[in-house]
Amino acid sequence: MVYSTNPNFNLEDKMDDETSDLPPAQQNLRVWRDNKSRAGKTVTLVKGYVGSQSSLEELGKSLKSKCGVGGTVKDGEIIIQGDFRERVAEILKKMGYGVKAAGG
């Protein structure tokens, strides 16, 4: 928004800070294995989540605890340390998410 002629316009009312979370059945997540730019260490990436940052972090925390490894949530992705593509995909499917293993 650059300019509004409406004297009652309030930019904060028009912007939505949190995106609405899609139900798990409508999510289409991709599970990747990656080791580029990570000093040769392999990680599992979960991409494609549509929803709020807090919900994404909660999902990431759940995946990390169920895999028994560390990780983080950064730039809209869940990063799990190690190659856990099959396990992460299985956990997400049990949670009701649409999942596809992709990449690497």
Image (cartoon, grey):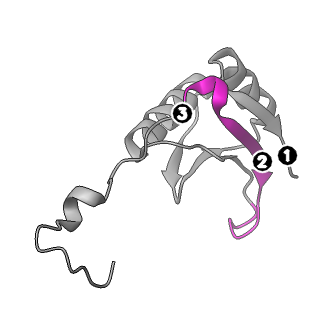
Position of 6 relative to 42 (above/below): below
- Span colored in magenta: 23-40
Q: Residue 22 has which mark?
A: 3
Q: Are marks 3 and 2 in contact (CB under 8 Å)?
A: no
Q: Relative to residue 50, is residue 91 drawn left or right?
A: right
Q: CA distance from mark 3 to mark 2?
A: 21 Å
- In percent of width and height, residue 55 lies at 43, 36
- In this rendered view, identify the residue nearer to me: 63 or 81: 63
> Magenta stretch containing residue 9, yes or no?
no
Q: CA distance from mark 2 to mark 1?
A: 5 Å
Task: Name which residue type carries label 2.
Answer: Trp
Q: CA distance from mark 3 to mark 1?
A: 21 Å
* Residue, disc 2: 32
Q: Tag 2, which secondary structure?
A: strand
In the picture as drawn, the residue positioned furthest to the right comes out as 104
Task: Name which residue type carries label 3.
Answer: Leu
- In this rendered view, identify the residue nearer to me: 41 or 47: 47
The residue under the point 76% across, 32% down is 99
- In this rendered view, identify the residue nearer to me: 28 or 43: 28
